[in-house]
């Protein structure tokens, strides 16, 4: 009897607001540190280019390999989360990410070794596809938009802080120490997930295999209708910090250090917007939110095309664009949380992640090609504004039900 009372007391503590919020905070932290590890090669790439004599193409490949691997890996990892639960899978992702980070600390002596480590590091980028279903299961449907936004903000914060702090840490302590410290944090966080959390009481394991589960999720209406706005929102959010330093240097003559700081500020602005988008979607509905946010993004892209004056006007334009894209990304995951049964949330989240991350390469390639051909970014920015307007129409029409 005493044992049963103890179990009941533990369950009540877990399902209390404080218990659920603690699990949300720990899971968000796990997603943040995994996404930090996932994207840390990119900020270190200039150092590798100098030390290993890498070409521009090799540097680009080295930076892109973990991103693509993490995006594609989110599909099976999300489906496995539906089967084995978020607690186990967040711990597994963290433990698996520990080894390539440790490997890169000592095996960064050749391009071939680096590519192998970058490919393995992609597993860290699948944490988001685990964090959303794990946290959503602890909350009622009316609050899942905000919850998904918090997890999205954690992923965005990991990416932004990695870009901002990893070069500074490498300069201060060396690349090896930076990798070792990251590996320690990732491993300890995975252990904490395994030891101090559990899956929501209503969660039930699924016996479906990964392949059939992914195919079934791909046929869901929410997947077919949500991927265009998500590709626009999350792809744009990831692309702009990556390409913004180049844009600012070439258009405004901004100092490289200041350009990198503004790109990091752009990413951090979207971090704040993710939970705001989820919260607003819970209140006014994801469809209306997406129409408004993508419409604002289109208008701001046109403002940027016109070339706002350097300084406050330019900084405000890009900050508002970051906020609009972050709100739209939060709105998409509120839509996924609202329209997907809990047993399929992992697979659907993984599919959305697989669409959004590769979409980040499209704006950068488009802007780069437009500048190479015309010597100006105007055509590329106009095409991006048209894409945002197409997203508005899609959200207004395809998401009516």
Image (cartoon, rainbow, N blue to C red):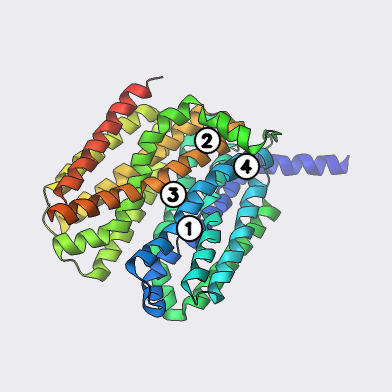
Mark 3–mark 4 Cα distance, whole angstroms, equals 20 Å
Side (left or right) of 196 relative to 18 = right
Mark 3, Cα crowd under 10 Å, few <14 / some 14-19 / many 20+, is: many
Does dot 4 land on a helix, a strand or a loop? helix
CA distance for labels 3 and 1: 20 Å
Residue found at x 75% / y 42%:
9
Q: Judge depth for marks 1 and 4 and give the one in front.
A: 1
Q: Are marks 3 and 1 in contact (CB under 8 Å)?
A: no
* Alpha carbon distance from label 4 to label 2: 11 Å
Q: Which residue is mark 3?
A: 153
Instruction: Tell which tag, 3 or 2, sits nearer the viewer.
Output: 2
Q: Position of residue 129 (x, y in %)?
A: 54, 44
Mark 2 to mark 1: distance in Å?
A: 21 Å
Residue 390 lies, in percent from the top left, at: 27, 32
Q: Are marks 4 and 2 in contact (CB under 8 Å)?
A: no
Asked if the residue at tag 1 contacts the one at tag 2, i.e. Cβ–Cβ closer than 8 Å, the answer is no
Measure how far apart labels 3 and 2 are at the Cα level.
19 Å
Across and down, in percent, residue 16 comes to: 63, 40
Q: Which residue is mark 1?
A: 66
Is 18 placed above or below 288 here? Answer: below
Q: Earlier in the sequence, mark 1 or mark 4?
A: 1
- Residue 50: quarter of image: bottom left
Q: Marks 1 and 4, Cα distance to the nearest angstrom?
A: 21 Å
Q: Is the residue marked by circle 4 packed among few (<14), some (14-19), or many (20+) residues within 10 Å?
A: many
Given residues 360 and 392, the one toward you in this image is: 360
Which residue is identified by label 2?
A: 348
Q: Which residue is disc 4 drawn over?
A: 81
């Amino acid at each position: 009897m005493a044992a049963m009372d103890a179990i009941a007391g533990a369950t009540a503590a877990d399902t209390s607001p404080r218990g659920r919020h603690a699990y949300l905070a720990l899971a968000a932290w796990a997603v943040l540190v995994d996404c930090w590890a996932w994207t840390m090669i990119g900020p270190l790439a200039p150092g590798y280019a100098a030390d290993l004599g890498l070409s521009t193409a090799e540097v680009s490949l080295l930076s892109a390999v973990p991103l693509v691997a993490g995006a594609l890996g989110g599909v099976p990892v999300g489906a496995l989360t539906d089967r084995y639960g978020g607690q186990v899978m967040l711990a597994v992702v963290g433990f698996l990410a520990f080894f390539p980070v440790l490997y890169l600390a000592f095996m960064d002596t050749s391009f071939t070794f680096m590519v192998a480590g970058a490919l393995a590091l992609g597993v860290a980028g699948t944490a988001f596809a685990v964090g959303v279903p794990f946290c959503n299961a602890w909350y009622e449907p009316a609050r899942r938009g905000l919850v998904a936004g918090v997890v999205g903000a954690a992923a965005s914060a990991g990416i932004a802080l990695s870009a901002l702090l990893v070069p500074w840490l490498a300069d201060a302590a060396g690349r090896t120490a930076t990798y070792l410290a990251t590996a320690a944090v990732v491993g300890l966080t995975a252990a904490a997930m395994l030891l101090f959390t559990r899956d929501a009481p209503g969660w039930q394991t699924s016996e479906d295999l990964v392949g059939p589960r992914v195919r079934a999720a791909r046929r869901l209406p929410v997947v077919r209708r949500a991927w265009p706005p998500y590709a626009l929102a999350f792809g744009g959010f990831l692309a702009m910090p990556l390409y913004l330093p180049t844009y600012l240097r070439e258009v405004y003559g901004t100092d490289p250090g200041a350009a990198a700081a503004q790109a990091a500020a752009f990413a951090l602005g979207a971090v704040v917007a993710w939970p705001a988008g989820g919260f607003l979607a819970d209140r006014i509905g994801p469809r209306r939110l997406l129409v408004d946010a993508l419409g604002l993004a289109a208008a701001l892209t046109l403002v940027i095309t016109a070339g706002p004056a350097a300084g406050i006007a330019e900084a405000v334009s890009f900050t508002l664009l970051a906020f609009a894209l972050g709100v739209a990304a939060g709105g998409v995951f509120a839509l996924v949380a609202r329209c997907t049964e809990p047993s399929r949330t992992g697979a659907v989240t993984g599919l959305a992640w697989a669409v959004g991350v590769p979409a980040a390469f499209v704006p950068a390639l488009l802007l780069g090609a437009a500048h190479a051909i015309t010597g100006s970014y105007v055509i590329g920015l106009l095409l991006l504004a048209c894409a945002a307007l197409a997203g508005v129409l899609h959200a207004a029409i395809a998401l009516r039900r």
